Image: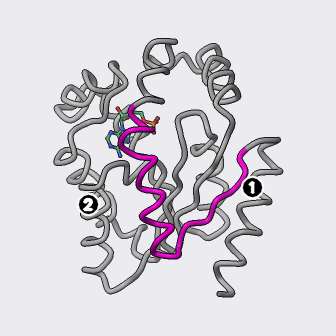
Amino acid sequence: MRLILMGPPGAGKGTQATRVADHFGIPAISTGDIFRANVSQGTPLGLEAKTYMDAGDYVPDEVTNKMVRNRIDEPDAEPGFLLDGYPRTPAQVEELDGMIRFTGHKLDAAVVLTVDADELVARLLQRAETEGRADDTEDVIRRRQEVYAEQTHPLIELYRSRGICVEVDGMGTVDEVTKRIFEALDIVDES
Ligand code: AMP
């Protein structure tokens, strides 16, 4: 199973990614988590990424693509993977297509979580209190939503045109959303 999970910041991608990946026995690969781990360890990659992350901007494609390529080459991703927060730009889509083609596999589905704009902000402000992420301040939250709308939202149409886009209502409890994702993926499996 090769999946991507898309949706605006605050849509609940991270929480759902782990659940879906566990179900399929594949790793959930979150580019945001990998960047944050590098920032906290002070690696050269972390130092490079930090300025962009703190501003709510995307880390340059060359840096992000190389990181994902290395991660996907790990043995645990051989049976499949779920990408959380990648691809987010046309250049990343192209790179991912190349990586998957190279292994002779295909992308099974692009799951898109949809959540009301007001609910997104409420969730991120709530997360700011519990997790204390550096990029969960009001200004940076706004910037991240803008960047998503400009650069990533248009990619949904692209996956829709490929017939692999699975849109799931991300409102409600974590369990409700997980159930909807599983139901939607079963439909994809049967098609
Ligand atoms: P996330 O945890 O997915 O919200 O990502 C946090 C931050 O990491 C983003 O605001 C970006 O600065 C950076 N980031 C994560 N994934 C990507 C990506 N695919 N392309 C570029 N930057 C990314």
* Amino acid type for the residue under numbered disc 2: Arg
Q: Tell me the quadrant of ligand 1.
A: top left
CA gap, disc 2 and disc 1? 28 Å
Q: Give the residue displayed 50% in from the left and 61% down from the top.
A: 82
Task: Check disc 1: other Cα within 10 Å, few if <14, some if 14-19, many if 20+.
Answer: some
The residue under the point 65% across, 46% down is: 114
Left/right of residue 90 with respect to residue 56 in the rendered view = left
* Residue 178 sits in quarter: bottom right
Residue occupying image coordinates x 48% and y 57%: 156
What is the number of the mark on residue 94? none
Q: Quadrant of the C terminus?
A: bottom right
Residue closest to the eye, 42 or 47: 47
Query: CB at mark 2 closer than 8 A to ligand 1?
Result: no
The residue tagged 2 is 69
State which region is magenta.
147-170
Left or right of residue 157, residue 184 in this image: right
Q: SS for tag 2?
A: helix
Which residue appears at 68% of the width and 25% of the height?
Answer: 118
Q: Position of residue 150 (x, y in %)?
A: 38, 38
Identify the residue position indicated by label 1 in the image: 178
| Residue type pointed to by label 1 | Thr
Q: Is residue 82 above or below residue 98?
A: above
Please tell me whether residue 80 is drawn above or below residue 37 in the rendered image.
below
